[in-house]
Image (cartoon, grey):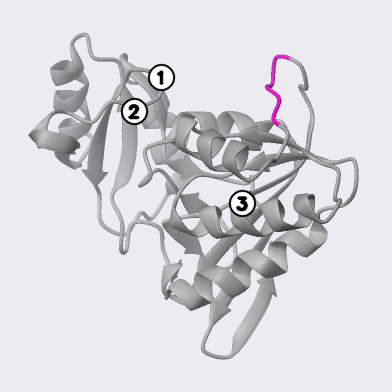
Amino acid sequence: MDQFKKIAAEAAVTQVRDGMIVGLGTGSTAAYAVDALGKLVQKGLRITGIPTSEQTARQAHALGIPLTTLGDQTQVDLTIDGADEVERGSLNLIKGRGGALLREKIVASASTRLVIIVDETKLVERLGSLSAVPVEVVPFGWQLAAQKLRAAGAAVSVRRGTEDRLFLTDGGHYILDCTFGPIAAPASLDRELNGIVGVVEHGLFLGMTSEVIVGGRDGVKALLP
């Protein structure tokens, strides 16, 4: 799978052009793209990155990729990121296993193009077939949000980090991993999750994807919505 991720990432970065503002995703697959961009920067490519997590910011800084923020650049030319699931046809996504879903969605929403890179195992016929939907919640009263998520049909698991402590996002929030099973109506679930008090953001990325680049046994292929 690592090799499939790497070839998808290397294919995606060929779309980066001199002078671009580039959103830098988070997670094991996106890390390959950041590595590839670092090599191009070292060869003279001039870009500015907007990282979607502190982890990605550290990686990019170590590779010499100049960084900025959405406070200084409110429009992103191209974001390259990974996904936990990609629904065939719609190219709707579940994201957030890496814990950066809020910043990832903010950067994606500011992007002219969102290119997703995955290995072929991430393609599904229906969202929720393989992955839980991460839901980011404020720490205060998170138990109430969990209760409402269960009422919405989810099996809820509180994400834990090191030393069995509750996982804390870069924004200081908790993540509840919500298993719904195959999701028949993602747009309806999106609205329901957005209506729960205490929910900051969730991992359904609907109608945002410009292209998915898939690495697999037969090489690389591109999917368009």
How far apart, in angstroms, are the residues tagged by discs 3 and 1?
A: 22 Å
Circle 3 packing at 10 Å, graded few (<14), some (14-19), many (20+), is many
Badge 1 amino acid:
Gly
Q: Residue at x 50, y 52 (%)?
A: 93
Which residue has dot 3 on it?
34
Q: Residue furthest left?
A: 164
Badge 3 element:
helix
Q: Start and end of the magenta stretch?
A: 67-71
Q: Nearer the viewer, residue 118 or 87?
A: 118
Badge 1 element:
loop
Q: Which mark is residue 136?
A: 2
Q: Residue furthest top?
A: 140
Which residue has dot 1 on it?
171
Badge 3 amino acid:
Val
Relative side of 94 to 16, left or right = left
Relative side of 45 to 90, left or right = right
* Residue 98 appearing in the image: yes
How far apart, in angstroms, are the residues tagged by discs 2 and 3?
A: 25 Å
Badge 2 amino acid:
Glu
In the rendered image, residue 192 lying in the magenta stretch gets the answer no
Q: Quadrant of the N terminus?
A: bottom left
Q: Are marks 2 and 1 in contact (CB under 8 Å)?
A: yes
Tell me the mark number nearer the camera, choosing from 2 and 1: 1
Where, by quadrant of the figure, is residue 164 drawn?
top left
Q: Residue at x 40, y 58 (%)?
A: 127
